[in-house]
Amino acid sequence: MKPLPRGRHGLSREYIAEHQRERLLAAIAGSLEDNGYDRTTVSAVSSLAGVSKSDFYRHFASKDECFFAAYDEAVEGLRGDVLAACREESEWAEGVCSGLAAALNRLAAEPAQANLLLVEGLRAGPGVYGRFQGAVESFVPRLRDGAPVGTSAGRPPGAADEAVVGGIASLLGRRVLAGEAARLDRFFPELAEFALTPYLGVAEARRIISAR
Amino acid sequence: MPPRGKGGARERPALSREFIAQHKQRRIMDALAELTAEQGYEATKISDIVKRAGVARKTLYDNFEGKEEVFLAAFDSARDEVLGRVAEGSAGEDGDWQERIEGGLAALLGYVAEQPILARMCMVEALSATPATTKRYEDAMETFVELTKRTLPKDARLPDTIAETLVGGAAWIVYQQIRRGDAERAEDLLPELTEFITAPYLGAGRAK
């Protein structure tokens, strides 16, 4: 992002403030991706965002506060995409597939956010780990609500919904660490199968996924 | 160490010195694990550790570079213990693969129930303590993924990532159990986790 032009640009103070905040949030995600948590400093983030350090402190009291805000915003963005995709489907299995596809597409398109959500969420200390955990858990009801409770394949295991969401988060985190963030969307068929199989059995899961 | 004097007693000082050193290392590692479980890694100071372990500060620094190295040593020791038990639990040459998966899981959950403090350190605190502890956790996960791959039947039609997602999912469930303070009842999870891990393979097997 280019710095705002200096001088009289006729932009309102609120507009500039919000704009600066957004730039700082994007800048901290970019810096975390390139340099990791320890080497991400207030100076580095400010300079990447093209704002002064004193402007940084007008928005955030510390690096961690900026980090938390970026994290929360990334979670909200991801959740928004997933929920919107789920809402367009009336069948449970189609909703799961569409929600998963929306999540993978967003993460693949925004590798810095994928890194923030799935890798830095685990590495940057307890304050963020709690956020990571909360974010993962918030997807569990999306999988659980409306899920079949018994089919020809039998009843799903009691822990299935949490284990499926946790398993997907774990795999994605490992792949982001391996430098594959931009290609996360290619895991859609296998992750959809992993998500649907405990509820529908592997044959039905595959039928639904291949029909998409 | 050169032998001193004659007779059977000459080995004793050397042995006992090593024994004492190991014992002190163990006490330091256990103290860190306890304190980390109680108050988190960040809040745990060297002074707390030596006080809890009942050793001199110098003893800690004679044996470890600092807090992180104590954590890593405690982690490695617990991980080796768990891996040994899980490998043993899932070995059963005669047993079929489902029994071996269940045996391995039972060994893991048994360890969590028996050693809730070390389990918490390895599966909860390690994730967020320092980059080096996170790396240790990831490497240990990799080892469990490999072990699971070797135990599960080969089925070319299942996704390549299935062992990773299954182990990641099971680890998440155990993590939640520990976070809730229910590590002592980890063995309650055995039926559902076994079913969760074996279900995709059973379905695929039936479809043959």
Image: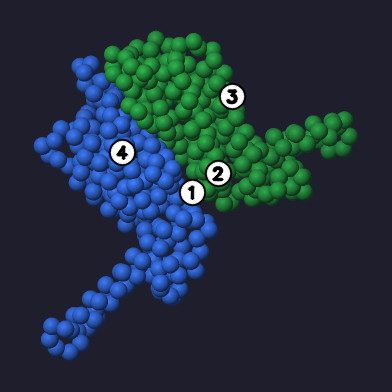
Q: List x then y, in percent, for residue A38.
A: 57, 52
Q: List x then y, in percent, for residue B138.
A: 39, 45
Q: List x then y, in percent, for residue B182.
A: 39, 44
Do the CB atoms of the residues marked 2 and 3 lie less than 8 Å apart? Answer: no
Q: Is residue A197 left or right of residue B57?
A: left
The crowd level at tag 1 (other Cα within 10 Å; few <14, some 14-19, many 20+) is many
Label drawn at residue A80: 3
Q: Disc 3: which chain?
A: A
Task: Kindly identify the amino acid type of the residue bearing the numbered disc 1.
Answer: Ser
Q: Disc 1: which chain?
A: B
Q: Disc 2: which chain?
A: A
Q: CA distance from mark 2 to mark 1?
A: 9 Å
Do the CB atoms of the residues marked 2 and 1 lie less than 8 Å apart? Answer: yes
Picture quarter with the N terminus of chain B:
bottom left
Q: CA distance from mark 4 to mark 3?
A: 35 Å
Q: Is residue A119 left or right of residue A162?
A: right
Label 2 sits on a secondary structure element that is helix
Q: Colour of chain B?
A: blue
The crowd level at tag 4 (other Cα within 10 Å; few <14, some 14-19, many 20+) is some
Q: Disc 4: which chain?
A: B
Question: Which callout, 2 or 3, points at the residue further toward the start of the chain?
Answer: 3
When the figure is inspected, residue B176 is found, relative to residue A212, above or below; the finding is below
Q: Quadrant of residue A59?
A: top right
Residue identifier under label 1: B128
- Foreground label between 4 and 2: 4
Task: Kindly identify the amino acid type of the residue bearing the numbered disc 2.
Answer: Val
Task: Kindly identify the amino acid type of the residue bearing the numbered disc 3.
Answer: Gly
